[in-house]
Image: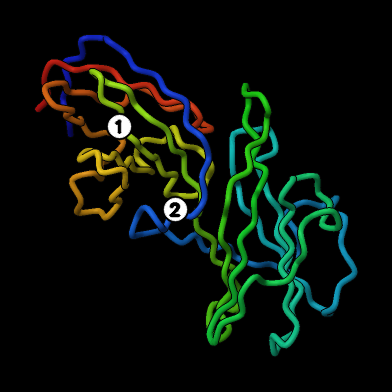
Amino acid sequence: IWLFCSTGKEYSIQLGMESDAMAVVNYYHPKRIELRKEPSESNLILPELRSSHPMYGRLAMGDSEDPIISILLDETHDQSISFLYIDKNNNEDFTDDDEATWDEVKRDHMIKEVLIEVAYNGISPQTVPYPVSFYRYKNRLKDSIIAFRNGYREGNLALNDTTYRLAIFDDNLDGLFDELDNGAIVIDMNLDGALDGKTDSDEYFSLKSPITFGEENLRIKQISPAGDLITFVTIDSFI
């Protein structure tokens, strides 16, 4: 638990969405999406199915009135045929999204990356393309699809004539960057142009922790739900 004494000077910066989060950090938190025989949304438009027993899942992302992204796995029992449909634009229509084929088929699993249009209240445009990776095991977890965040937000903090590159991560894959218990921030503290996101690195921080830049201490005051804006505030001291 950190105790702060804030002085109130604030720094707000815009952050853009980037892909390939695993090139920055050395971990991820897989989210297991349980598959069921019936969809959670009743008004879905289905593609022409190849199997006789499609399975459905759901992923909640963003803070809109309808955050549910529907998922359809069209697969035979022996997995000789396997297609993954993601309603990435959340219009309840599986026929107008990307190809349902897997990007890679490996010995024990299949992988697919999708840009999901995550909707947020109060921003323009209202949706943000968020890269999400899905994989399907061949010999286990037959009732599940696994997903993890492949997107992150990145920007630059100008502080006392020095510019620091930084990135924030939505670790629990709900598309909400403002949950300070469920993410991390990586900052190029040594100014070498690279972000070292290993969890034991001096550049890796909890979103709640104080951060010392030279002689100035800052903490995160606020992050927008979409992660496009982060505000730091200076602090006199912390314990």
Q: Nearer the viewer, residue 3 or 235?
A: 235
Give the amino acid type for the residue marked by disc 1 in the picture.
Tyr
Nearest to viewer (mark 1 / mark 2):
1
Q: Residue at x 52, y 50 (%)?
A: 19
- x and y percent of residue 16 in the render? 51, 35
Q: Quadrant of the N terminus?
A: top left
Q: Which secondary structure lies at badge 1?
A: strand
- The image shows residue 47, relative to residue 124, as above or below, that is below
Residue 162 is situated, as x and y percent measured from the top left of the image, at: 26, 25
Residue 38 found in image quarter:
bottom right
Give the CA distance from mark 1 to mark 2: 18 Å
**Image height of 170 relative to 104, above or below:** above
In the depicted structure, whether residue 12 falls above or below residue 152: above
Q: Amino acid at mark 2?
A: Ala
On the image, numbered disc 1 is attached to which residue? Answer: 164
Residue at screen point 59% across, 71% down: 111
Position of 51 compared to 141: left or right?
A: right
Q: Which residue is mark 2?
A: 21
Residue at the top extreme of this rendering: 8
Under circle 2, the secondary element is helix
Q: Residue at x 50, y 58 (%)?
A: 148
Q: Position of residue 108 (x, y in %)?
A: 53, 84
Mark 1 Cα-neighbour bin, 10 Å: few <14, some 14–19, many ≥20: some
What residue appears at the point 50 percent right and 38 percent down from the top-left corner? 176
Does the CB distance between marks 1 and 2 fall below 8 Å?
no
Q: Position of residue 134 (x, y in %)?
A: 58, 64
Left or right position of 190 against 232:
left
Other-residue count near label 2 (Cα within 10 Å), few / some / many at <14 / 14–19 / ≥20: many
Quadrant in which the C terminus is drawn: top left
